[in-house]
């Protein structure tokens, strides 16, 4: 191990198959400091990236996200579903064509299976409310009818997501959700090494 004044402690290997247990322990410790611990702030920055263009709606994607989470919180949803509501569209900034899938991948190690499922499938469930105007099948969500999370996802879209484009709604600020973000993203990540 060496210490670089710019980058901090560093391993001496250049190939992972030549690493020692001490090397890997160092990588794990440094990853916690530089990758895991900043995650709540990273999520806030990802939400911030949704500020700006309203892409035709009356509010931007940032306010839509906060409004969706505000409705979930006010209805008494559990923390996982509130954070799912807050982050369900963060994929829009870099993967607009499959934003549900991307957001689900981000939250999956930290949220419940139910909340992750809802994030992953909210796009097709949202379609129930408007896809006929695109010439698409509003019942496309029916292929998930047997899922134990079908009703939760339907409710998520009907009551929180598809109604949250309202500039008159009393949307809660990001500060309301920061303690929940910190709680969720400091949980031990599940599923490491399974992909
Ligand atoms: Fe969405
Ligand atoms: Fe949304």
Image (cartoon, grey):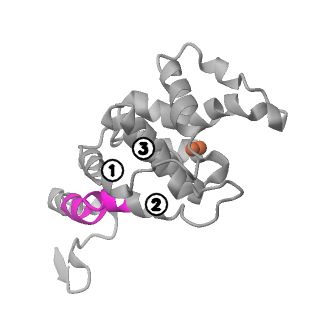
Secondary structure state at the residue bearing disc 2:
helix
Secondary structure state at the residue bearing disc 3:
helix
- The residue beneath circle 2 is 46
**Percent from the top left, x then y, of residue 170?**
46, 49
Q: On the picture, is 26 further left or further right than 14?
A: left
State the separation of the CA atoms marked 1 and 3: 9 Å
Give the numbered dot on residue 177: 1
Labelled pair 2, 3 in contact (Cβ < 8 Å)? no
- Frontmost residue, 144 versus 128: 128
Secondary structure state at the residue bearing disc 1:
helix
- Which badge, 2 or 3, comes first in the chain's sequence? 2
Chief SS of the magenta region: helix
Ligand 2 closer than 8 Å to the CB at disc 3? no
State the separation of the CA atoms marked 2 and 1: 14 Å
Q: In the picture, residue 190 is in which quadrant?
A: top left
- Whether the magenta-drawn stretch holds residue 40 is answered as yes
State the separation of the CA atoms marked 2 and 3: 18 Å
- Which badge, 2 or 1, comes first in the chain's sequence? 2
**Percent from the top left, x then y, of residue 101?**
56, 42
Residue drawn 37% across the image and 61% down it: 42
Q: Nearer the viewer, mark 2 or mark 1?
A: 1
| Span colored in magenta | 28-42
Q: Nearer the viewer, mark 1 or mark 3?
A: 3
Residue drawn 64% across the image and 65% down it: 53
Q: On the picture, is 154 further left or further right than 186?
A: right
Q: Residues within 10 Å of mark 1 (few under 14, many from 20)?
A: some
| Residue 26 showing in the rendered view | yes
Q: On the picture, is 166 further left or further right than 173?
A: right
């Amino acid at each position: 191990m060496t210490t670089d004044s710019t980058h901090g402690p560093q391993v001496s290997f250049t190939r992972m198959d030549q690493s020692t247990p001490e090397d890997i322990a160092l990588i794990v410790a440094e990853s916690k400091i530089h990758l895991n611990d900043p995650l709540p702030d990273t999520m806030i920055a990802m939400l911030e990236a949704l500020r700006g263009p309203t892409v035709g709606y009356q509010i931007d994607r940032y306010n839509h996200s906060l409004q969706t989470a505000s409705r979930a919180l006010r209805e008494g949803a559990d923390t996982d579903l509130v954070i799912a509501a807050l982050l369900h569209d963060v994929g829009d900034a870099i993967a607009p064509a499959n934003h549900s899938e991307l957001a689900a991948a981000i939250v999956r190690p930290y949220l419940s299976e139910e909340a992750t499922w809802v994030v992953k499938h909210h796009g097709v469930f949202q379609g129930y409310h408007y896809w006929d105007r695109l010439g698409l099948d509003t019942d496309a969500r029916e292929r998930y009818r047997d899922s134990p999370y079908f009703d939760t996802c339907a409710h998520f879209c009907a009551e929180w997501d598809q109604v949250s484009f309202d500039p008159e709604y009393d949307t809660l600020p990001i500060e309301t959700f920061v303690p929940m973000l910190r709680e969720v993203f400091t949980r031990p990540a599940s599923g490491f090494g399974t992909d």
